Every structure is written in C-alpha cells, then in structure tokens.
C-alpha cells in the first residue's frame, strides 16, 4: 500500500562533504518525516547498485553520546562511506526501534532496576521488540530511482523489509567493535534479535563519556 508524501530537497554541506538533503513528509507529526542524504557515486565506483544505510533515530547516542550502544558509531561510519563512495543515508525519525522515546526510556529503567536487556524489557512492557516497518523507506528509495541496494546493516529484518517492497537488496556488514559498555547490547542483538555479525570473545575498553 503506497502512502502519500510531500518532498523537499536542498544542497547540503557537512563536515563529511557535499551532498543533497531530502525530507519526505508522510504526515503531520515529526516522526512521519524521513530525512535522506544523497551523494553522487564517485568516479571509482562502477556498479549499478547504490550504497544505502537505513538508520532510525537514537537520540541518546547520536545527540547525548550515551555509551551503551553503537548507534552513533554506525551513523558516523555510514556517513563516511556514503560521502566517500556515493549513496544514501536514509534516517527514520523513530527512536526506540520505532517504539518511541517514552518506551525506550522505560525499557532502560527496567534495565537499571531489574537487569533486563532491551529485548526482555520491551516484552515486559508489552510492546514489540522491533516494530519498525520499511514501506516508507522503500518509497523514498524508489522516488530517488534506487532499485538495486547495497544495504549497510547487520539486521536481517531491514533486508527482508526492503526486499518485501520489491527492491533488490544485498547486505553489506556494518560492524562496530564493542566496548565494555556496548558489549551487552550488541550481544543481545546477536543472540535474541538475530543480528548478523561476528561477535568477538571480549569487549574493548570502555567508551569515554
């Protein structure tokens, strides 16, 4: 089912380089917007497929630099790759894996009090562990004439979600070395949520605050 959207774009200059910034608005609420950075392919890239990172918001890490997940680092590495080689970073404004900020913080509070990981905390709260859908992301990609995707992700749900919308998708791993702080979160992703990456036997040093 196709949703209606409004679209605007402009030239964009960042610390990573030059690109084009798109916003796709699917409704009146902030979380109905999808942001997208588009960078033309470099001359060194000879491939019809497009490098794409689909990332949902994690304000605690991306703005306030929390150390218990790898979301900031994944976004940083993705932007570096896209501005170097060309491609798209599609940013969904939906924190808490789509469950919202209130649910996310309630889940973290359960972790503080009872030692629950993010997977079990969401189940305790009676919400899906990962309620994100990718229909709107697929609409953005199709509007930008992208059909063949090299998807930067460790999450098989993203691959299946975009394939289910008719896109050709090949997964490209996006592995961030864990720290002592992020190790439990990444372990939960792998063991309980099926994320695909090689998990090392021990974590590195704690992340600086």
Image (tube, rainbow, N blue to C red):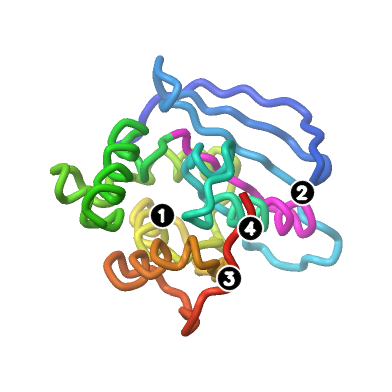
Residue 40 is marked as 2
Give the farthest residue toward the front. Answer: 113
Name the front one of labels 3 and 2: 3
Contact between labelled residues 2 and 3, with CB atoms less than 8 Å apart: no
Contact between labelled residues 1 and 4, with CB atoms less than 8 Å apart: no
**For the residues marked 3 and 2, what is the alpha-carbon distance in whole angstroms?**
29 Å
Residue hosting label 4: 50
**For the residues marked 4 and 3, what is the alpha-carbon distance in whole angstroms?**
25 Å
Q: How far across and how far down the image is residue 152, in percent?
A: 56, 62
Give the farthest residue toward the right. Answer: 43
Looking at the image, which residue is at 62% across and 22% down?
Answer: 8
Name the front one of labels 1 and 3: 3
Q: Label 1: how many residues lie within 10 Å, few (<14), some (14-19) or many (20+)?
A: many
Looking at the image, which residue is at 39% across and 66% down?
Answer: 184
Residue hosting label 3: 177
126 displayed left or right of 113 = left
Q: Assess whether residue 32 is covered by the magenta stretch.
A: no
Looking at the image, which residue is at 58% across and 56% down?
Answer: 74
Residue 162 is marked as 1
Q: Label 3: how many residues lie within 10 Å, few (<14), some (14-19) or many (20+)?
A: some
Q: How far across and how far down the image is residue 89, in percent?
A: 61, 47
Looking at the image, which residue is at 13% across and 43% down?
Answer: 126
Which numbered disc flags the more N-terminal residue, 4 or 3?
A: 4
Name the front one of labels 4 and 3: 3
Which numbered disc flags the more N-terminal residue, 3 or 2?
A: 2
Which numbered disc flags the more N-terminal residue, 2 or 1?
A: 2
Magenta stretch: give its range. 79-93
Task: Relative to 158, say whether 23 is above or below.
Answer: above
**For the residues marked 2 and 4, what is the alpha-carbon distance in whole angstroms?**
10 Å
Q: How far across and how far down the image is residue 108, in percent?
A: 33, 45
Task: Relative to 31, say whether 131 is above or below.
Answer: below
């Amino acid at each position: 089912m196709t949703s209606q959207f409004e679209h605007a774009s402009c030239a964009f200059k960042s610390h990573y380089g030059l690109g084009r910034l798109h916003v796709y608005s699917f409704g009146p609420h902030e979380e109905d917007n999808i942001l997208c950075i588009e960078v033309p392919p470099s001359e060194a890239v000879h491939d019809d497929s497009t490098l794409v990172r689909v990332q949902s918001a994690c304000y605690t890490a991306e703005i306030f630099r929390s150390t218990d997940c790898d979301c900031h680092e994944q976004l940083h590495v993705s932007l570096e790759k896209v501005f170097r080689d060309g491609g798209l970073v599609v940013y969904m404004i939906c924190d808490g894996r789509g469950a919202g900020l209130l649910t996310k913080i309630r889940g973290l509070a359960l972790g503080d009090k009872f030692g629950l990981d993010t997977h079990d905390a969401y189940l305790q709260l009676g919400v899906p562990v990962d309620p994100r859908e990718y229909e709107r992301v697929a609409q953005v990609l199709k509007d930008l004439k992208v059909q063949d995707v090299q998807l930067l992700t460790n999450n098989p749900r993203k691959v299946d979600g975009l394939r289910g919308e008719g896109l050709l998708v090949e997964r490209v791993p996006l592995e961030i070395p864990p720290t002592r702080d992020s190790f439990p979160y990444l372990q939960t992703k792998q063991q309980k949520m099926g994320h695909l990456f090689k998990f090392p036997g021990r974590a590195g040093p704690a992340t600086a605050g």
